[in-house]
């Protein structure tokens, strides 16, 4: 069965350099797909093309198709604003806006025209609850988001991404700048969130990929080397380079 | 193996041998830097002392009251109508009015220019616009004054009631002069923004305009304000260009197109006509002291803004 979210022969070029080569991947609903591979293998570029973040880079061009709910997102009639509303994204470095905790979350909904105060309050609370941050910040919503710790900031960023109610969440090494305790909190959160979302996560941490993902895709030099059930990939990889990479012998 | 051993020995030797020499180098460098800093401090302190001693003499020796000086609106230093009167309120008013108005004109232009360079067309915008802006910064103020006198003043004279000279002309000339200051500071602040901030906003489905107005501008605002204050400080201290277009009448104008003066233009204009040590001369020094005090206030404001900027 084909998923509602998949790529079909997707290639991404920076100028003439082909950073992502002809990749077809399925992202099943309610599951976590981990993208792994050595630095510079194109996994982040691939991730960024999924919500057209590469639009901001002038030399980046895309070939192939990305399907979301039956729609090719690079088609000329695609409303990139509506598209990005359906896809949340969180980066490696926590990057809260220089505003209060409340304003950080209420921000996206306000963009999309929600002005009603009680409705915004509700969105803020539910987003923070989903990101398992509500109990820690409920008494100081008016404080600056920058007063939070790194781990809290990252969960705030996840809450912010959830505030516009996306169906897909893209995570670009969301825990690599965090301490172990915060990392495990974020991981628990991801497992919790996959009940409602399909999640794509780029990670350099093999254990993390093994712990939280259902499917794993191994990238090498812009090519998809192997893709399948996480358990299978980690216990019985088909490809020799995959074997070497996940066992830490290179990369 | 042998080579390695020799290498080790060499390192050992250089460690112990050069220790003294580096110590001397440090000492020489340190003394030289200290000397330069000491000289600099001495110069600054003596300038302040000189201006203050001359400037305060007006009030201490010549018995002019500080209140009459700062808030008196009549300036008649030679006493052409009886006793000399030293009220510098018109000049203070002129200085504030021109520099505030200049900042008001220049700020939106500068902010838009820096947004254009960093956000709208970062690829070629900066390459094209930045040299132009830098060129503006390098033009001597007498050229600005000259252009103001031959272009801005006639234009204002033909368009608005009045003679064209005055606060409006001064502010327009000054606004172009301070454009580079505000633009370069705003551009630096915008380029220093973490890219993730902008992308987070885009990822939430914001348009470019929403992102600029709701995320980018509020975040860089303290830095931009620093630029505006520095620009105002420059406008406040500029003498020559202003003097050429403002008319130099020592009274508070009733419109933007009526001749008036600023602290700086009054000082440069009167400077040659006074006898050293006379009350008139001392009064000019008091005005210089007021200028210096204002500069100090501007620096203080910038400091406060920078502290807020750090968050």
Image (cartoon, rainbow, N blue to C red):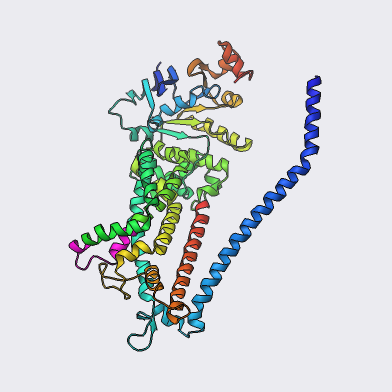
Task: Name the residue rendered at 35%, 89% in the picture.
Answer: B82
Q: Is residue B4 above or below residue B283?
A: above
Q: Is residue B74 or residue B29 the one in the foreground?
A: B29
Q: Is residue B245 or residue B200 the one in the foreground?
A: B245
Would you say residue B170 sits in the magenta stretch?
yes
Task: Name the residue rendered at 40%, 64% in the picture.
Answer: B236
Q: Would you say the magenta stretch is mainly helix, strand or loop?
A: helix
Q: Is residue B206 visible?
A: no
Task: Name the residue rendered at 40%, 72% in the picture.
Answer: B272
Question: Horizontal placement of B307 versus A14: left or right?
Answer: right
Q: Is residue B99 or residue B278 the one in the foreground?
A: B278
Q: Position of residue B59 (x, y in %)?
A: 49, 82
Q: Is residue A185 visible?
A: yes
Q: Position of residue B3 (x, y in %)?
A: 78, 21
Count of numbered circles in the view = 0
Q: Residue furthest bottom?
A: B82
Q: Position of residue A208 (x, y in %)?
A: 59, 27
Write down the region rendered in magenta: B156-174
Q: Is residue B78 above or below residue A229?
A: below
**Quadrant of the image for the N terminus of chain B?**
top right
Q: Is residue A157 above or below residue B224?
A: above
Q: Quadrant of residue B248?
A: bottom left
Question: Horizontal placement of B144 versus A122: left or right?
Answer: left
Would you say residue A120 sits in the magenta stretch?
no
Q: Position of residue B192 (x, y in %)?
A: 47, 43
């Amino acid at each position: 069965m084909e998923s509602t979210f998949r790529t079909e022969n997707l290639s991404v070029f920076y100028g003439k350099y082909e950073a992502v080569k002809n990749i077809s991947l399925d992202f099943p609903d309610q599951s976590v797909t981990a993208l792994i591979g050595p630095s510079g293998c194109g996994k982040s570029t691939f991730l960024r093309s999924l919500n057209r973040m590469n639009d901001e880079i002038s030399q980046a061009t895309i070939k192939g198709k990305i399907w979301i709910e039956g729609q090719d997102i690079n088609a000329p009639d695609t409303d990139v604003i509506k598209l990005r509303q359906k896809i949340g994204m969180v980066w490696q470095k926590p990057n809260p806006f220089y505003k209060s905790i409340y304003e950080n979350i209420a921000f996206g909904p306000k963009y999309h025209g929600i002005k009603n105060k009680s409705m915004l309050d509700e969105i803020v609370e539910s987003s923070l609850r989903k990101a398992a941050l509500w109990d820690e910040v409920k008494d100081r919503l008016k404080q600056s988001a920058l007063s939070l710790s790194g781990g809290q900031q990252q969960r705030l960023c996840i809450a912010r991404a959830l505030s516009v109610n996306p169906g897909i969440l893209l995570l670009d090494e969301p825990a690599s700048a965090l301490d172990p305790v915060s990392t495990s909190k974020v991981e628990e959160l991801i497992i919790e969130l996959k009940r409602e979302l399909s999640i794509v996560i780029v990670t350099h941490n093999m254990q993390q990929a093994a712990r939280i993902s259902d499917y794993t895709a191994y990238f090498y030099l812009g090519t998809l080397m192997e893709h399948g059930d996480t358990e299978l990939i980690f216990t019985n990889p088909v490809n020799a380079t995959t074997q070497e990479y996940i066992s830490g012998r290179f990369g | 193996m042998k080579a390695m051993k020799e290498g080790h020995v060499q390192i050992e030797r250089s460690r112990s041998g050069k220790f003294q020499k580096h110590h001397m180098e440090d000492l020489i460098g340190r003394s030289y830097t200290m000397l330069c800093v000491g000289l600099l401090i001495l110069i600054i302190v003596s300038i302040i002392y000189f201006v203050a001693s001359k400037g305060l003499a007006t009030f201490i020796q010549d018995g002019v009251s500080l209140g009459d000086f700062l808030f008196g609106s009549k300036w008649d230093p030679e006493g052409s109508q009886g006793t000399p009167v030293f009220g510098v309120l018109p000049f203070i008013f002129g200085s504030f009015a021109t520099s505030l108005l200049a900042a008001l004109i220049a700020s939106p232009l500068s902010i838009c220019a820096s947004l254009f360079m960093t956000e709208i067309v970062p690829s070629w915008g900066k390459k094209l616009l930045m040299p132009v802006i830098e060129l503006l910064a390098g033009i001597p103020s007498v050229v600005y004054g000259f252009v103001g006198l031959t272009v801005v003043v006639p234009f204002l004279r033909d368009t608005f009631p009045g003679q064209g000279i005055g606060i409006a002309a001064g502010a327009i000339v000054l606004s172009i002069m301070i454009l580079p200051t505000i633009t370069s500071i705003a551009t630096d602040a915008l380029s220093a923004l973490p890219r993730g901030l902008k992308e987070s906003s885009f990822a939430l489905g914001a348009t470019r305009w929403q992102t600029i107005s709701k995320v980018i501008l509020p975040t860089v605002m303290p830095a931009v304000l620093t630029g505006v204050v520095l620009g105002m400080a420059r406008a406040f201290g500029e003498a020559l260009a202003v003097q050429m277009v403002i008319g130099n009448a020592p009274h508070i104008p009733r419109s933007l197109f009526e001749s008036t003066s600023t602290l700086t233009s009054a000082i440069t204009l009167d400077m040659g006509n006074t006898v050293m040590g006379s009350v008139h001369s001392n009064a000019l020094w008091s005005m210089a002291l007021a200028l210096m005090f204002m500069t100090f206030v501007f620096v203080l404001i910038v400091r406060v803004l920078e502290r807020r900027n750090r968050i």
